[in-house]
Image: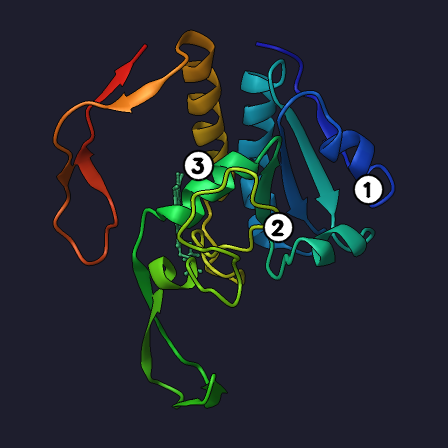
Amino acid sequence: MTMAEIVDVTDQNFESEVLKSDKPVIIDFWAEWCAPCKQIAPVIKELAEQYGDRIKIAKMDIDSNPGTPGQYGIRAIPTILSFKDGQVVEEFVRFHPAFAYMRRTATRDTELSGAEIKAGDKLALWYVSGNRDEKAFDNPDYFDVRRDPNPHQGFGGGGRHFCLGAGLARLELKLWIEETLKRFETIEPDGECERLSSTFLNQWYSMPVRLT
Ligand code: HEM
């Protein structure tokens, strides 16, 4: 086990500590008054103990540092984000989000692009469609690993239901890509893919590939 070092990040040192870090960074946005933040604090400490030599574990107090959370659209805490060469990962999640939609219930009357929504209405949020919205993305059907900005909703659109595992999922995808590319130069399709039959899960049972 390594030393459990958790770096305190501020609006001022966010760029040097996070954006320019040579290691991947997992950052926990928290506040003194937030009880769920206290509940996940031991998990963050454990992450620092286990992975501190490879990943920088950081936290930011959103009350003292309002700038960065505003910039990243953080509307609920605790929120955990990961940073490091994230563009490729974001494009994977935009292009093929793991979930086709989530169903939510409107809490009040509103209007969305001309559609009237009443409190209590049940709504399907189609991430597969939103992520290809031509008003939000140039050439949306093109898989572009350099797409930046990439305001996809593959982990949700923000707010209290935003994917709790987004930081972990981003890190797993990043490590999978990095470690595969270290060993192989090319990945090619190699056989029939078997798609999971579901309207909710936008996933595959198997996808044979040849690595060379
Ligand atoms: C690429 C992988 C993943 C994708 C695309 C994904 C996507 C999503 C989406 C779309 C939501 C709903 C967001 C909303 O309604 O605003 C969600 C919620 C959630 N996700 Fe993920 N997720 C992924 C991986 C994970 C992992 C690895 C974990 C756990 C370790 C996780 C845990 C959760 C939990 C607990 C929620 C519910 C949060 C709530 O309702 O408050 N997810 N995820």
Instruction: Count neighbours of disc 2 (C-alpha within 10 A) and say few if under 14, some if 14 to 19, many if 20 or more.
Output: few
Name the kind of residue labelled 3 in the image.
Ala
Camera-nearest residue between 209 and 75? 209
Give the spatial CA distance, label 3 vs label 1.
25 Å
The residue singled out by tag 1 in the image is 10
Give the spatial CA distance, label 3 vs label 2.
19 Å
- Check the image and name the residue furthest to the right: 12
Q: Quadrant of the N terminus?
A: top right
Is 203 placed left or right of 179 in the picture? left
Give the spatial CA distance, label 1 vs label 2.
23 Å
x%, y% of residue 92? 42, 40
Q: Quadrant of the C terminus?
A: top left
Q: Is residue 62 above or below residue 15?
A: below
Circle on res. 149? 2
**Residue 27, quarter of the rendered image:** top right
Name the kind of residue labelled 1 in the image.
Thr
Instruction: Count neighbours of disc 3 (C-alpha within 10 A) and say few if under 14, some if 14 to 19, many if 20 or more.
Output: some
The residue singled out by tag 3 in the image is 169
Q: Secondary structure at mark 2?
A: loop
